[in-house]
Amino acid sequence: MIALLLYRTIADHLVPWAMAFATRMLARSLNMPEPLVHSTGDYVVAQVIAFEHGVGRSLCPFRLARLLRAWWRGRH
């Protein structure tokens, strides 16, 4: 119980600090303001989600395997 409390206390304080530090370091290395780094990250996430729901779905290996099996059965 004490270990759980200790881990949760550390995680509650360390994770937000680490995220802010990583964002600040990334912004400094890219020579960009921090809010721009945040908005760019949001834009990238939106683009990845759009790709996964659009083209990515048609490239699903299970779907491609089903199409290949159906095509193979149609040839014989």
Image (tube, rainbow, N blue to C red):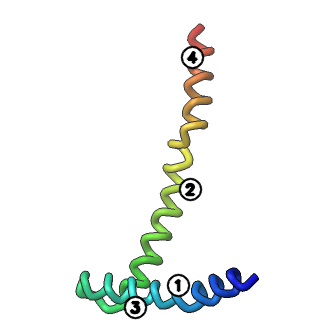
Q: Position of residue 65 (x, y in %)?
A: 57, 30
Q: CA distance from mark 2 to mark 4?
A: 27 Å
Q: Nearer the viewer, mark 3 or mark 4?
A: 3
Please tell me how crowded label 4 is: few (under 14), some (14-19), or many (20+) other residues with Cα within 10 Å: few
Q: Secondary structure at mark 4?
A: helix
Sequence order check, earlier mark of 4 and 1: 1
Instruction: Name the N-terminal-most of marks 2 and 1.
Output: 1
Q: Which mark is residue 72?
A: 4
| Quarter containing the N terminus | bottom right
Q: CA distance from mark 4 to mark 1?
A: 51 Å
Q: Which residue is mark 2?
A: 53
Mark 1 belongs to which amino acid? Val
From the top left corner, tell me how far across and down residue 57 is, in percent. Answer: 56, 48
Q: Where does residue 46 sit, x and y in percent of width and height?
A: 50, 70
Do the CB atoms of the residues marked 4 and 1 lie less than 8 Å apart?
no
Element type at marker 1?
A: helix
Residue located 56% across and 11% down the image: 75
Query: Residue 35, which numbered label?
Result: 3
